[in-house]
Image (cartoon, rainbow, N blue to C red):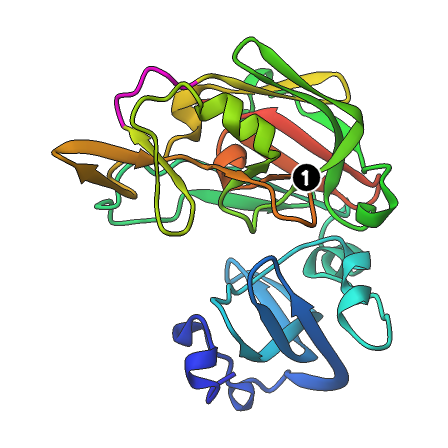
Amino acid sequence: MEGCGRFCGYPLHTLQPLDSSTFSSSSLMFSIRYGEGFSRGFYAQDTVTLNDAISVPHTNFAVSNINDGELTRDGAGPDPLSRYNNPDNTIVPTLVTTMFEQGVISNNSFSIYFQPINDTSLESRINGNIIFGGVDLDKVEDKQITYFPSTSHQDYKDYWAADMESIVVGNETVNFDSSIPALVDTGSTLIFVPQQVVDLALSDVKDLRADYMGQYLVPCDSKDLKPLTFNIAGTPLKLNPEEYIVPHSIAGGAVDGIPYCYTYLHESPPYIDIILGYGFLQQYVSVYDNENNRVGLGRRIK
């Protein structure tokens, strides 16, 4: 909200309730701790307008009045996840569920498409879209989405997550004795995997480096990187080496005149084994299906 100063991540996104005749606040407080940082505030409702055409009244959202990191303007996690962030354990419907309940969309689902950005000098940095109630199969190879049941691991059943059996790094396979939950997370930039996978993927890279945050950089022309294949419910989902490298024009550096590029790979945090973030999802159209409790993935058309 206006007035939270340095605690707001994006001042241009601040909310001014007095400018809205349909805004209403609630007494329900929220507190969220992320992998890095936290946010606190209260829940409110207002009318959300999409494409200046579709109005969705009484949409719930969280208003942050203190946080220690950057805030984005939206989020669409599974509804049940909201109960862990407020003292009453109340499930707060998301925009997607509200649209479904009001008959704006016929399916309680949404999909995300990313088109990778290769040049920061482009006028528009908008590189994707969200479709409420379905998916644009024209953006998917063979118009085929593979759906995976929500993870069987109880600690992550309220997340967008599926069970992963193994990861193939080049010609070596890392098997998991019992499948492990893999979060499908548009809110994460990196691909978080177990340390063993990172080691296999990068161990042969000549002149590998890491920055002060521990993110890996490789010579941009390196031929030592290996393809990665993530196996979920028997379905292989492959990333070629160039697909998990950040283009130098986006973020990179140079050492002794040699261009270095960041990778999207990083060791998993303590609380989860695998997170498939933007570095993965820019190659796969993702579908989040509330009605059938499943996640869908399909290779984007290049």
Span shown in magenta: 220-225
At a point 67% along the width and 37% down the height, the residue shown is 287
Q: Position of residue 94 (x, y in %)?
A: 72, 61
Residue 32 magenta: no
**Extreme-top residue of the structure:** 171
In which quadrant will I find the C terminus? top left
Q: In the figure, residue 299 lies in which quadrant? A: top right
Q: Describe the element under mark 1 as helix, strand or loop.
A: loop
Q: Position of residue 93 (x, y in %)?
A: 78, 63
The amino acid pointed to by label 1 is Asp
Q: Position of residue 112 (x, y in %)?
A: 57, 41
Q: In the figure, residue 179 lies in which quadrant? A: top right
At a point 81% along the width and 37% down the height, the residue shown is 151
Q: Is residue 82 left or right of residue 269?
A: right
Question: Exactly how many numbered labels are in the figure?
Answer: 1
Query: Which residue matches tag 1?
Result: 273
Q: Is residue 72 left or right of residue 44?
A: left
Q: Nearer the viewer, residue 181 or 243?
A: 181
Q: Is residue 96 visible?
A: yes
- Mark 1 nearby-residue class (10 Å; few <14, some 14–19, many ≥20): some
Q: Nearer the viewer, residue 261 or 159?
A: 261
> Image height check: is 126 above or below 175?
below
> Image height check: is 262 above or below 100?
above
Q: Position of residue 264 (x, y in %)?
A: 45, 37
At a point 82% along the width and 58% down the height, the residue shown is 80
**Extreme-left residue of the structure:** 257
Residue 224 magenta: yes
Q: Is residue 136 visible?
A: no
